[in-house]
Image (cartoon, rainbow, N blue to C red):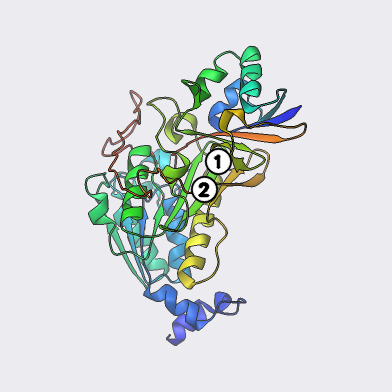
Amino acid sequence: MVTVRLATPLRKFSDGKPEIQASGKTIREIIENIDKAKPGFKERIIENGEIKQFINIFHNNEDVRFKKGLDTEVAEDDVISILPAVSGG
Amino acid sequence: MNLNEIKRYSRQLILPDFGTKEQSRLKKAKVAVTGAGGLGCPVSTYLTLAGVGEIHIFDFDRIEMSNLNRQFLYTPEDVGKPKAEMAAKRLSEINPEIKIEGINEKVTYDNAFELLKGYDAIVDGTDNFAVRYAVNDAAVVNRVPLFHGAALMYEGRAMSIIPGETACFRCVFPEPPPAGMIPTCREAGILGSVVGIVGAIQASEAIRYLAGLEIGLKNQLLIINVDEMRFEKVRVAKRDDCTACGEHFIPKPVEDVCTVLPGSEASGVTEGDE
């Protein structure tokens, strides 16, 4: 399993929890698997097959845009963080 | 440095790597703080206490009762008064050795490039995407280091942007979310101590940078979750195709996506509840 950390604006998909466990071989698979349990999740993050412009996904603290994006492969015990922009202050 | 200054700053003057040279760098520095709200209060307070020579605080809001869970420069008697002016007044009392100006002006994409010129640093304490992207683009184009911070509920973010060297806010988030997708502090709430932490981090980065010391949030986005008291840094990188700091600057004003709820006590002069 992979740990998926969710920023505050996404926690309605994790019942308010900061992180959830999910399975999948790539970031895309993980998002699709979470979407099965929590419909609407994928739509919040992906648009036309790409990560939305105001969302960042980090795989073991590295931006996946500089890896293989949604096709970035993940291994057991890896940590993924999904982070939309926030503007409050 | 006069005797008063030596006494006032003695606890930082005895720090390793910090001495009269660093203190005089702070004294010569001119810093813009955008926003005098939840982030702007701690940011401008710590810059004031550290002895930054000239601080300009930009805010167009008036003080509201709902600001007082976190905006500690104001009292209930201040409700209705302009924030920038009140912040400057309080801070001038706290440190009369420096120059503090409150600028009661709304920062927009149209005026940011002109307003935010000639500073040694900008610390961003705004509360909405429209101004954040304007401040980012102006900082990058004017080559002024920008110390970013944002917060929502129990979560905070901070990152330091050195134009020409590091990723900017737009490299990390090229576009703002559509209206209504990400709640504001007004809608989702904010704990005062969370903006306190973030503002103190922004100020620490700015102070160390201005003093000529190394800083820790270049190409790093710090994510703070106070609900589990977790601090983590993720690596970010400059994008060659960034419209702000990439090869060719393309102006990209961001629409004000803030939703003002009906019946809210906002003055409506800007997005309000910052």
- Nearer to us in this view, B247 or B134: B247
Residue at x-position 44% and y-position 25%: B181
Residue at x-position 36% and y-position 67%: B92
- Note whether B138 is above or below B91 in the view shown: above
Residue under pointer 2: B237
Residue under pointer 1: A66
Give x and y (percent) for residue B113: 26, 53
Residue at x-position 64% and y-position 12%: A36
Instruction: Say if mark 2 contacts mark 1, CB within 8 Å.
Output: yes
| Chain to which mark 1 belongs | A
Q: Secondary structure at mark 2?
A: loop
Report whether B228 appears left or right of B242: right
Q: Secondary structure at mark 1?
A: helix
Which quarter of the rendering shows the N terminus of chain B? bottom left
Categorize mark 1 by other alpha carbons within 10 Å: few (<14), some (14-19), many (20+).
Answer: few
Residue at x-position 35% and y-position 31%: B258
